[in-house]
Amino acid sequence: MELMFKSIQDAIRFKAFLTANGLQDSFTERQSQYIYSFQYLLIKKEQYIHAILQFIQDVKRNEWVDKVLREKYKYDNEDERIEIISILNQMFSGERVELISLVGQMDEEEFIQEAVIDLLDYKGAVLFESFMRFRLKKYFDHVREYLNIAIDEYKMEQDYQMFVNMLRDYLKKRSTKQNVVHVLLDKPILFFNEKLNEMGKDEIKDIMDRRLLSNHPVYVDSSVIAPLLSMAPIKIFLYTDEEDQPLIRTLKNIFEERLSILPTTHLNTLIKAFTDT
């Protein structure tokens, strides 16, 4: 069979995937098309399948997604498209399980491989662009489902970053009410001043800037983020044994170098030391 490319760039890139799989086929040019005539298809079929599959996954999928982002979703900014494609690739590599669960797991290789086997079993000449458009339509329909989730995630991440930047700006302008604050992130959440005396609810309530909750009731956590922003401490010691919580990620992003995270046992040691002195 013959596989034809309209683009010399595609033909050259495809050659690289053939070479990486131990295949030495070269293209010839005929009537402004670049044609591969597979010489060892019967004995090296698995290598051809793997080479074409890799080419689609590593090159053509992202090109197709980039085009859809530009033409359908009107993402003219290249950096935005790169960010969205990065999220999509993380989904395909299995890194974003929480996003995959929203649309369902797709066996990408199975989708592509079935089409590639049919392609290689064909006895005539096939234009690669036509193969992509028609034979891989079902595959790209599933890619589009993943893409929609990736776009939504990108928008949420942008909103989150705007939210974090807004709170950083608030923190810079807020005068310090407590130089050092110790926070035990447990149930219940407890605040201690720099002398490790526990701060009561009324004391925290008096310091609290109510505008944080009235202006941003959905985003600002009232139990930890709002009190800490209101206190605007120079240094925060946060004690927890579960550092991978989403709340801690947000605290790190807002308070940056002001925040230190320590195990809960460290707070108990400190309190005991203060009590004994």
Image (cartoon, rainbow, N blue to C red):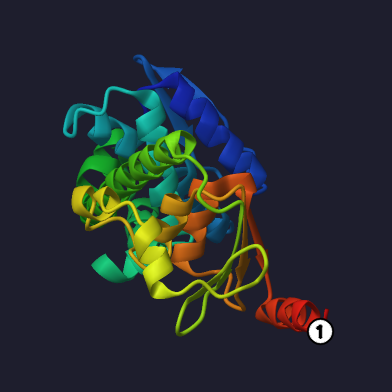
Which of these two is toward me, 261 or 22?
261
State whether residue 202 is above or below residue 187.
above
State whether residue 90 is above or below residue 176.
below
Q: Residues within 10 Å of mark 1 (few under 14, many from 20)?
A: few
Would residue 205 be found to the left or right of residue 271 on screen?
left
For the point 61% across and 51% down, the residue is 179
User: In the picture, residue 106 is in which quadrant?
Assistant: bottom left
For the point 35% across and 64% down, the residue is 205
Q: Is residue 40 visible?
A: no
Which of these two is toward me, 146 or 268?
268
Which residue is under mark 1?
A: 276
Q: Is residue 166 visible?
A: yes
Quadrant where the C terminus is found in the figure: bottom right
Residue furthest left as drawn: 72
Mark 1: amino acid? Asp
For the point 33% across and 45% down, the residue is 154
Residue 84 image offset from top left, x and y in percent? 36, 41
For the point 52% across and 75% down, the residue is 185
Residue 80 image offset from top left, x and y in percent? 36, 32
Q: How many marks?
A: 1
User: In the picture, residue 217 is in which quadrant?
Assistant: bottom left
Which of these two is toward me, 99 or 105?
99
Residue 227 image offset from top left, x and y in percent? 41, 59
Quadrant where the N terminus is found in the figure: top left
User: In the picture, residue 239 is in which quadrant?
Assistant: bottom right
Residue furthest top as drawn: 32
Would residue 72 be found to the left or right of residue 221 on screen?
left
